[in-house]
Image: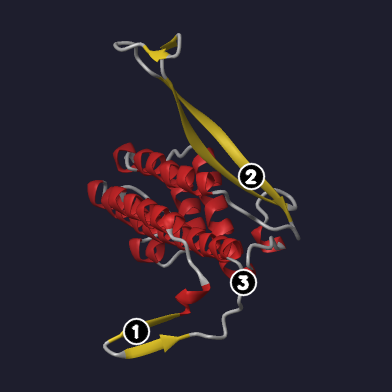
Amino acid sequence: MRSAIQLAGFHYIVCLKALPTNADHEITFDKMTYAFEAIGRVGSNALHGEFQRWAAVSVLRDLIENFSTFLMEIYGSAMQANPGAAYSATLIQFERKGIEDQLDILSKDFSIDAAWTTRLVGYNRARNCLAHRQGKVGPRDANDGNELVVRWLATKIELAIIRGQHVHGQAARVEVQDKEKRIGVGSFLIFLPTDILEICQTFQFAAAAFGTLASQR
């Protein structure tokens, strides 16, 4: 799972650095030109914003799909380690579920911090909203009343500074902060680049938290 998260973050950073222009509507391979000239002639800022939105959808999709596979592996490992224990689903049934149903099964069979389930459900709803409704929040996206709530963790590192200089030998203070974004039904979901990068980091924390489930049985 770690490599999948690192790859998703890498892809997003590459997309952030890209500067698409209207000239990018065509490319030539092996003396053959592939062109999509129906693309509207818009400014570079608008193109870059649309490219970032596409990149955010792609990153969330990759993270969700890889984490779902990771949960399958965790569930299978638990079954192998404790074959006599009672489980809410067979491994095949678990594999056929979407990530929200997988999380529901895991919450029945293991002791899971509800905050992790809330975060992961929010990412899945956000991904669906961006991919299927162009970011406009619909009733099916809402996970808290009439709002889509996306929560994640951000790491804040404070160095010991005296007179503008870092004091060597002094331990840095690391603080993990909770962040959230609330979007009402009918409004548009927009992620800042820092939001997506912090969500990638949050998946690293999630992988560590869920990785210990098999040992509970």
| Relative image position of residue 53 (x, y in whole percent) | 55, 61
Q: Secondary structure at mark 1?
A: strand
Amino acid found under the numbered disc labelled 2:
Lys
Depth order, front residue of 178/82: 178
- The earlier-in-sequence mark between 2 and 3 is 3
Q: Earlier in the sequence, mark 1 or mark 3?
A: 1
User: How crowded is the residue under tag 1: few (<14 C-alpha within 10 Å), some, or many (20+)?
Assistant: few
SS at circle 2: strand
| Residue that numbered label 3 is attached to | 42
Query: Which residue is rendered at x = 48% and y = 46% of the image?
Result: 199
Outermost left residue:
81
Amino acid under label 3? Val
Check residue 181 in the rendering and tell me which mark sits there, or answer none: 2
Nearer the observer, disc 2 or disc 3?
3
Q: Label 1, on which residue?
A: 28
In this view, 162 is above or below 81: above
**Could you say where residue 153 lies in the image, as x and y percent from the top left?**
50, 37
**Can you give x and y, in whole percent of width and height, for residue 192 in the image?**
57, 48
Q: Residue at x 60, y 67 (%)?
A: 43
Work out whether mark 1 precedes mark 2 in sequence or the reverse, and give the earlier one: 1
Q: Is residue 84 visible?
A: no
Counting other residues with Cα less than 10 Å from the Cα at mark 3, is it few (<14), some (14-19), or many (20 or more)? few
- x, y (%) of residue 127? 54, 60
Q: Do residues under tags 2 and 3 come within 8 Å of each other at their CB atoms?
A: no
The residues bearing labels 1 and 2 have C-alpha atoms spaced at a distance of 42 Å
Q: CA distance from mark 2 to mark 3?
A: 29 Å
Relative to 47, residue 188 above or below: above
- Judge depth for marks 1 and 2 and give the one in front: 1
Residue type at numbered disc 1: Thr
